[in-house]
Amino acid sequence: MGARVEFQGRTWQVTGLVDGRVHLAADDGATGCVLASLLVAADDFAVVGRRADDLPAAEVWQALPLAARERALAWLRHIREIETGLPGGAGSGGEPRPAYDPQRFTLAEREHAKAAELAALGWTKVGRNTVQRRRLAYHKQGLMGLVDQRTVRPRSATGRADERVVAAVLEALRDLRGRKATTVKQVIDRAERMVVGRYGPGVKLPSAASMYRLVKALSDPAEPLGSPARTATGPRRSGGPPSALRPAERVHVATARLGSRVVGEDGRLVAVSVTAAVDEATGCVLAAVLHPQESGAELPVLLAEMAVPRPLRAGWPGLLRRAHEDWPRRLLPLQARLETTAARPAAVPETLVLDAAGPAVTSWFLTVCEGLGVSVESVHTRGNSAPGACGHTLGVLAGAFTRYAAGLADAARPVAGHGEDDAGAAGAWFSMPRLQDLLDEWITARWHTRPQEALRHPLLPRAALTPDEMWRVLLGASGAVPLPLSGQHFAELLPVCRKAVTDAGVRLGRRRYDEECLNEHRGRSCPTTDDGRWEVHHHPHDVRHVYIRLPDGLLHPLPWTDQAHAQRPFDATVHHRITQVLAGRTSGGTFSGPDPGTGARAQAVRPTSQVADAMPEPGGGPAADGTAGGGQEFGLWDAQAEAGQW
């Protein structure tokens, strides 16, 4: 309420937020009303005076020394404490320390207090001007603005030390974090034992004075050695965390198995699971990613799916249109699906709750969450807790969608199968991208519009709301809209690999990707990498696009050159037949036709008389004397009659 936003080339002020719709007023007196999810997903939407989220590129961040990354993250916590009073940022909980209370002290006074604190903790050459300069650099460049260039250069205190020694010191600091009576000498001894035990005597250890400086440089001033840890590591209170009251306040990540199978890239049937991000307050599925059961989903990919609206992704309308042409049996017409999918909720969560047995948490993912201000919790799903309830909800979703997909396969099989063997036929009709598209459509058209038992207000126990309705209700009640990321962040969060750019484009996973933007770079080495290969971002479970970073620093989409393959005549039938042949190669299944390994051979060695018996006369079956019509013209070859002779 009261915020100023840019939309459709004009500046508006938010005058109201009712039932998920934002009421706007322009300076010239014009008014407007737009659905909140459509507003934040618009290409030209921006909040006036708010710094856009800036994620460090994965390749650039990983190339930095470990000490520089740790130091930048430590600066980020200090800057947040200066601006909001809390190291974790606004909404992280807790009470501000007296010197950093925004209600009592000005920003300049809080900067002076932080400079004095850091100087008392041993940070050299850190005055109020340094603190202010770092804070402004963060607002201009994001997390990369906090990287201390003196730490990156070889002349710095940590730059001359071996990277293995630096890693051992950081690990020792983490192991001894929060222990009473911990000294610098204990950290040094522990780090030296790690280096000698892992790498032997070949690693040169710095002098004692250099090790002392290294420990001082890498330790967090907010947590001096020997002091208790500021972040609680013990169990939560028995009552558990309070229920979420705002959309995207707490988002749970859970995994469930599907009953259907898909055709893998090798032609074999693969068991599938779904990993989803479920909003605790509204029950909305912000993201759902299908993946093989033996390999889990990647959390950065899930974050990209939940935080970047579909309309902001490269080529999204065209991909959706081709998907509709690929599979005509749809819950929604194309235009209706474009509108409903554009209005589907998307937001950066305040807290991401992960199951301890769920997807792996990497350092890169934690860095991204730290930069976005996302809190990460790891919990065990027990009893009727919120994580357990969300896991149960996802299990119900997986079962309902499995029945829907099986019905689609049953409806398609008699049309194209013509009585073929049903073993595994349901799964053979779907590839992973096609089943993912069907799941996205089903969630938008069915799950989000289905009343749920968990969405009943205690004062209205007989009124069950749908996730879409609860999202709109809580948006109006909280008076704020959780903002998503921009379109460029979708590609930045995807996994990275290095590939060469040839005359044919980029090859990845036996597929070719090409676009006109590669014309001036074909056959050339990348000028920004050591090995000359180009940085390529790809979605592990969506082969239709990859993204390449060109010398301009931006990620450009490259479409799959053969993605129109699915719309050619008979390609779906050919895909299904290939699946059957490959399945029979290993399992000995039956087919409506000769066995690919023996049928041709058997026909080649059949006696001539048997072949003649199978050739029909012009009037129908073979001649009575066993010849092919007694000199008459041969008729059409009847495959069914031929098969009956085997």
Image (tube, rainbow, N blue to C red):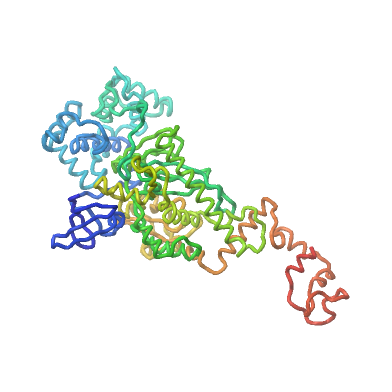
What residue do we see at 44% from left, 56% from top?
441
Answer with the quarter of the image where residue 201 lies. top left
Q: Residue furthest bottom?
A: 632
Answer with the quarter of the image where residue 377 lies. top left
From the top left corner, tell me how far across and down residue 317 is, in percent: 38, 63
Q: Is residue 201 left or right of residue 400?
A: left
Q: Is residue 125 visible?
A: no
From the top left corner, tell me how far across and down residue 310 is, in percent: 36, 56
Q: Is residue 548 visible?
A: yes
What residue do we see at 37% from left, 32% from top?
164
Quadrant position of the C terminus in the picture: bottom right
Decide which of 351, 412 is in the foreground and name it.
412
Answer with the quarter of the image where residue 111 lies. top left
Q: Residue furthest top?
A: 181
From the top left corner, tell me how far across and down residue 113 is, in percent: 14, 31
From the top left corner, tell me how far across and down residue 563 is, in percent: 48, 63
Decide which of 367, 271 is in the foreground and name it.
271
What residue do we see at 20% from left, 31% from top?
96
Decide which of 535, 596 is in the foreground and name it.
596
Decide which of 528, 236 is in the foreground and name it.
236
Number of labels in the image equals: 0
